[in-house]
Amino acid sequence: MPSATAAPPAPPSKPQLNRSFSIIQGHNEQRSELLDVLSDVKTKVQDRLGIVDFPLPQFILIGKQSVGKSRLIEALAGEQFNFVNGSLGSRRPTVLEFRNVQQNKHSRWYVMDKKTNKWQEHPLSEVTKIIGEAHESLGASVTDEPVYVRVESPYCVDMQIVDLPGFRDFALDKEKQQLADQIDNLVMRFMQDTRNVMLCVEEAGDAANLSTLSRCKRLDPGFQRTILIRNKLDKYYRDLTAQNINDWLNGFGDLPDNLSKFCMTLPHWKDGEECPKPFAELREDMNKQDLAELRSKGASEKFTSTIGFDNFTKYMERRIEVMFAQAIGPVLKKLKDLKQQNLEKEESMKDEIENTNPAQIVSTVRDVGMSFAHSLNHVMEGFVRSDAGRLTLEDELRAFAAYEEGQGADFMMLPSEDFACLDDYIDYLRNDIKVPAFDVEINGGAQFRRLMYEVEVFLRFSEIGVETKKKDVIQARGVSMGSVTWRDVVVKLLCTEALIPMKSRIRYAAERIKWFFIFQKDAVINFMLSIKGSADEQMFSSLYTKHVKLMLEK
């Protein structure tokens, strides 16, 4: 019997092709809409949070000068342009949003107006001028304040990317070296943010000498957020053979297996000549050339998906979908937090308007003062959550002495002449008197009790320190028509001899207590601020939270 042969599969019908195209187009439109929504949200809160403070992942483009970063940007946009000319290069982040819009016959370019936070459409020549001036205005300095550009084109790749200034290998003079150092610091701040995925552009060649990739490895040892792009592949076609092609694609063991890596040739032509054909067509030709050349040398199918610009963009589309899907939760949480902050701020402003009404200002000040006084009472009773103003007795005595010296104190700071300095007095209280809780950091009522203990010790040094003579006793008894008891004599002697030493020490006690209450303000404020949202919030007046805001604002 003749062997049966399987019939070749029938080519897809036109309706099937149209349906497949519609599905792909619909998927692309959904991805583009998702990027638009997240981008709009980020743009509207950018001025409040800054470019690195919103929980939305982003791709940052890094590499040395002249490795082809700008040409990769052009390839993603689908057309040729150049924002920055001159030897200084770019000096600030440029956020580029690419949107694939099949309906557009031509590309449309936009720049973000920082005053209105809205996109303003301009011709490409005007966009180039605006962005170029934004870089040139910095002179020989850098800034992390970005400029925003958006392009809608049928040749774009759907993604957002932050183009960062290129690393400088060397500088000709001191000024350019300072600029290179500033750029290093700027780029490293972006690289250190774990939400940023690093597109590391290197020139294809020896995998062991990729300097920018080495920087990425220091910050991302597992290469979880690093994508290597080996550019200018066609320069190394001749070095690749059937014997080494797969080893080269795998990095000759110098590149880890878990590192996402691609090699490609981006559109290029001879210097001084015009682009030989439409940029998007040249991009496609280079992609086909890379695949054909490496396959002809025996590249394994295992590595085919890492060759050429098209495979890179397909990978990026999948990576974007996964990253942004994971970001939805954090983004919503951040937006809810911002909403709550705005509501609280709105409520606070309403209260401020109400409380600063001239007709009610006296009443408001009185109420705030009452709230502070009641809060002080709670702190004195022992509010354990307050960490503000906690001191050991040694720290307290030193702070008191420094404060009084600054005020020009005119009273005795030591209890007697037996103490040469404050250190002697502190040592006496710690080791001889053994003041309770001497080395414990406390505030509020506990601190006040310890203060009173120390003041009591201080006052006990006010005894009469002179010898009482017979003449003094006779003078104290004096001449009287009535009877004078020895008790009266002793009282007169004490009034004469003990008044001055006691008076100076009472002044010390008064100043210590005064100082204590002056510096309890922080503890009271801390108490009033901590009530909101605490487990015992219902135990205290809601006016405490309201009034403490007025105190801090005024």
Image (cartoon, rainbow, N blue to C red):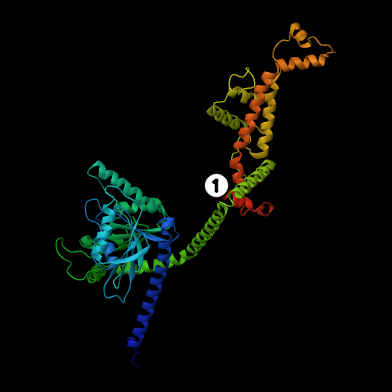
Q: Position of residue 96 (x, y in %)?
A: 33, 62
Q: For residue 67, what is the image quadrant? A: bottom left
367 left or right, relative to 318: right
Q: Position of residue 297 (x, y in %)?
A: 24, 67
Identified at 44% across, 56% down, the residue is 49
Residue found farthest to the bottom: 1
Identified at 81% across, 11% down, the residue is 480
Q: Is residue 242 above or below residue 21?
A: above
Mark yes or no: residue 204 visible. Answer: no
Pick the residue in front: 423 or 361.
Answer: 361
Pick the residue in front: 75 or 508.
Answer: 508
166 left or right, relative to 489: left
Residue found farthest to the right: 483
Q: For residue 16, what is the image quadrant? A: bottom left
Identified at 21% across, 53% down, the residue is 86
539 left or right, relative to 278: right
Q: Which residue is mark 1?
A: 552
Q: Is residue 29 above or below residue 119?
A: below
Q: Position of residue 503 (x, y in %)?
A: 67, 22
469 left or right, relative to 424: right
Helix, strand or loop for disc 1: helix
- Amino acid type, mark 1: Leu
Q: Residues within 10 Å of mark 1 (few under 14, many from 20)?
A: few
Pick the residue in front: 202 or 334.
Answer: 334
